[in-house]
Amino acid sequence: MDASSTYQELRDIANRLRILCIRATNASNSGHPTSCCSMAEIMSVLFFKTMRYRLDAPRDPSSDRLILSKGHAAPILYAAWSEAGLFPETELLKLRQIDNDLEGHPTPRLPFVDVATGSLGQGLSCAAGMAYTGKYFDKASYRTYCIIGDGESAEGSIWEALSFAGHYKLDNLVAIFDINRLGQSEPTAFQHQMEIYKTRLDSFGFNTYVIDGHDVE
């Protein structure tokens, strides 16, 4: 498949993920569809182009790890796994039902979730610990990806985790900040001032790229 076809497929997947999230949150009468939609292309590229994983064995030790630190966007994590073929789309319509495992936030009860991320600001610390283990103990090639919301970046624990990762040169950790400018009740502190985020991440030793999160290329 040529590059243009691949990019179009990723765009199409991103739009399907949006639709699935909206359907799921509408069926449950609750959830955070906008938080999901802001990262649709990110999830499309990660799941269907970048990450290495086995669909038949989500907990395979050699698979890349994904930590959704902004856990309230769980519907798009579920939608991505459904799109990949792990379970049927109809399961998404049972989001948050009492007898269903697709809760409002990810829990490790699900085979494709390593860390529960109900409390904001905690996911990157867990991801840094996993990356540290992968590099210095397992000496393995898997990467750890962590998607962080800009609202939760007001938590000091995010910056402590970045400091830890920089100190230990965790080049197997990929921290992805989803900058959508809005918190739950008001705009975030830095809104779309991307240079502030970049300067801070650079200072911790990260190789930082500012990209259009809706451009799959």
Image: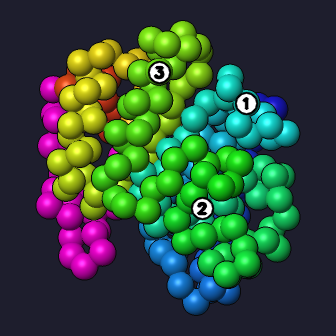
Residues at marks 2 and 3, CA–CA distance in whole angstroms: 27 Å
Q: Which residues are magenta?
A: 176-203
Q: Residues within 10 Å of mark 2 (few under 14, many from 20)?
A: many
Pointer 2 residue: 76
The numbered dot on residue 133 is 3
* Residue visible at 45% across and 25% down in the picture: 131
Magenta region includes residue 56: no
Q: Earlier in the sequence, mark 2 or mark 1?
A: 1
Figure check: 116 above or below 217: below
Q: Reply yes or no: does residue 185 show up in magenta.
A: yes
Q: Would you place residue 65 above or below residue 39 in this image?
A: above
Q: Amino acid at mark 2?
A: Ile
Residue beneath label 1, please? 60
Q: Is residue 199 left or right of residue 146?
A: left
Q: Which quadrant holds residue 48?
A: top right
Above or below: residue 185 compared with residue 176: below
